[in-house]
Image (tube, helix red, strand yellow):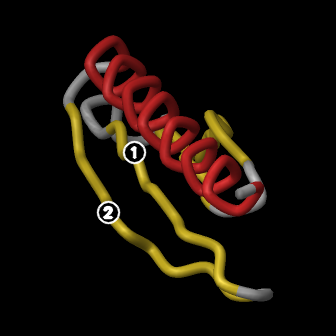
Amino acid sequence: MENVIEILNSRESSVVLTHDDADPGSWVVRRWKKILWFRKRISSDWFTNKEQAMAFANEMKRMSEERDNIHLIERKH
């Protein structure tokens, strides 16, 4: 069974962590950019354990949130 953990789902991007119980050494972090009603995959990074994958996913979340906030600040001016 495939498990999907949504780390970030903002208006401009999303980050998900995927793990398949059939393959215990496979943890995948994918980052998507949202364009209108489409999603474009920006990156796909593979890890062998949950701790590394979660740390990386949380870093991607932090970076995406910072980038999204910068865009919002620029639009307000």
**Visible in this render: residue 18?**
no
1 or 2: mark nearer the eye: 2
Name the residue at 36% across, 45% down.
28
In the rendered structure, the answer to whether residue 62 lies left or right of residue 74 reads left
Q: Amino acid at mark 2?
A: Ser
C-alpha span from label 1 to label 2: 8 Å
Q: Is residue 52 left or right of residue 55?
A: left
Residue found at the far top of this picture: 51
- Location of residue 11 with respect to 67 vertically, above or below: below
Depth check, front residue: 74 or 17: 74
Question: Is 44 rendered above or below residue 47?
Answer: below
What residue is at 70 percent from the left and 62 percent from the top? 75
Quarter of the view holding residue 13: bottom right
**Secondary structure of residue under mark 1:** strand
Q: Along the line of sight, which residue is nearer the eye, 48 or 56? A: 56
Type of amino acid at the residue the image marks with label 1: Val
Badge number at residue 43: 2
Left or right of 13 in this view: 75: right
Residue at the (49%, 47%) spot, across then down? 67
Residue at 62% in and 42% down: 69
Q: Earlier in the sequence, mark 1 or mark 2?
A: 1
Q: Is residue 6 visible?
A: yes
Asked if the residue at tag 2 contacts the one at tag 1, i.e. Cβ–Cβ closer than 8 Å, the answer is: yes
Left or right side of 53 for 2: right
Residue to which mark 1 is pinned: 29
